[in-house]
Image (cartoon, rainbow, N blue to C red):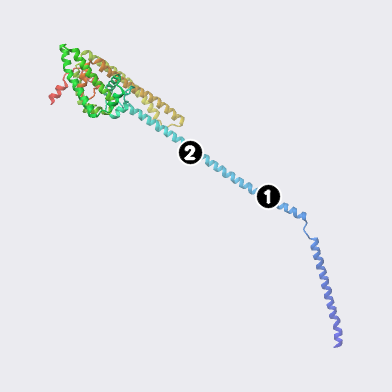
Amino acid sequence: TATAFVTLGPVDEFMTLRRRLSGSRELAESSTQSEDGAHGNEPDPGEDAGRLRDKNKKAQARYRAKLRNQRIITYRDHAKTSLDLDAARSENQLLTHTNDLYELVIALRQEAVGVLEALTEPSPEPAGHGIRSRRHIDSTTQLSAGQAAMLHTACSLTCRDAASEEEILAFKHVPIGNLVSAWIELRSRLADALQPAQAAAVSGAGQAANLKELHSILQAGLNFLGRLGCYRPELISVVMGEGLSPQPETNSALHWQNVLAALKLNSHQEAELRLTRDRLVEGTCKLHAKRRAILEELGHSIGVAGARSVHEACRISLEVQAGTSVLRATVEAEHRLHREVSRALLLDTLGPTQQARLLVAAHPFLPDPLMLLDVVQLHGAHPSIHPVTEMSAAA
C-alpha cells in the first residue's frame, strides 16, 4: 500500500500541474485575443462620418423626391380647380347674358303692349292750362273721341275764363247734388232762352237782346262743362244724367239724327261740314297708314327668334323706343285733328243759337261733333224722315 501511494502520488501531481499549465495558456490566449479585439478592431471615426454623410444624402434625396411628387400633385389639383372655376365663371356669364336678353325682350314687349294700349284710347289729351290728362279722364269716364274733343274745347274755353284759385278750390268741393242741380238749371235756362231767340230771329223784334241773353247762358253752360272736365271729370256721367257714350248703335244713330235735325243747318253749313269731314277722313287715313307701317316694323323687330347678343337687344330696344315715339306723335296728331275739327264745327260753323240747340238736344249725352259729321255724310243735314216723328209713330 505504501508503494502504491508513492507511485500514484506523482502522477496526480503531474496531471494537476498539466491542467494548471493548460488553463494558464488558454487564459493567456484569451487575454491576448481580448486585447487585440479591444485595440485592433475599434471603428475608425473618419469611416463613421462618411457613412453618416451617405445616410444623410440618401435621406435628403428621398425627402426631395417626396416634395417633388407632392408639388406635382398640388399643381395638378390646382390646374383642375382652375379649369372648374373657369367653367363655372363661363356658365355664370352665359346665364347673366341670357337673363339680360330675357329682361330686354320682356321690356320691349311690355313697351310695345303699352303703345298698343295707348293707341286704343280714343279721347285726346288736353294740353296745358291745368287741364286733366287724357289718361285720367279715360280712367273715370267713357268718352268717345268726339265727346272728348268737345270736352277739350269746353276746357280750353274755361281756361280762358281765368278763374281764380279760390274759385277753382271752391268748385272742387261743391257737393255732387249741387253740381247736378246746377247743370239741370243751366240746361233748363238754355232751353227756355231758345224759344224767344228763335221767335226773335223770325220776327226780328228784340233779336239782339235775346241773342245776348242766350249767348250768356250758353257761355255759362260751356264754362260749367269745362270746369267739370278740368277739375272733376269723374262726375261727368253723373252730372249729365243717364250717361255719355251712345247706348245701342241703332238708338245712337236715331239720337244723333234727331240732334242734327234740331240744328237746322243751311246748305252752306252742310257743305262746310262735308268738307270738314273729308279733311278729317283724309288726315285720319294718313295717320293710320303711317301707324300701321310703324307697327309692322315694330312687330318684325320684336317678333324675331331672340337677340343673339346684348348689343343686338339694345339695338332692338332703341328701334322700339324710336317707333314708340313716332306712334305717340301720330296718336297726338290724331287727337289734335279731332280737336281742330270739333272746334271748327262748334265755334266756326254753328252759330250761338245752334250751339245752344246742340247742348239741349244732345241730352243726356255730351255733344259728339264727330258723330254729327258721320250723320251728315250718311243722311245729309235734313233727313227725309225726322227721327222724332219716326219714334213717336213707333210709340
* Quadrant placement of the N terminus: bottom right
Is 98 left or right of 114, judged from the image as shown?
A: right
Q: According to the image, label 1 marks what residue?
A: 60
> Which label number is shown at residue 142?
none
Residue 264, percent from left and from top: 19, 16
Within 10 Å of disc 1 (Cα), the crowding (few <14, some 14-19, many 20+) is few
| C-beta proximity under 8 Å, tags 2 and 1 | no
* Quadrant placement of the C terminus: top left
* 36 relative to 282, above or below: below
Q: Can residue 391 be seen in the rendering of this structure?
A: yes
Residue 30, percent from left and from top: 80, 68
**Viewer-side residue, 129 vs 383:** 129
Within 10 Å of disc 2 (Cα), the crowding (few <14, some 14-19, many 20+) is few
Q: Amino acid at mark 1?
A: Gln
Mark 1 element type: helix
Residue 59, percent from left and from top: 68, 51
> Which label number is shown at residue 92?
2
Is 203 left or right of 165, judged from the image as shown?
A: left
Tell me the CA gap for discs 2 and 1.
Answer: 47 Å
Residue at left offset 24%, top offset 29%: 176
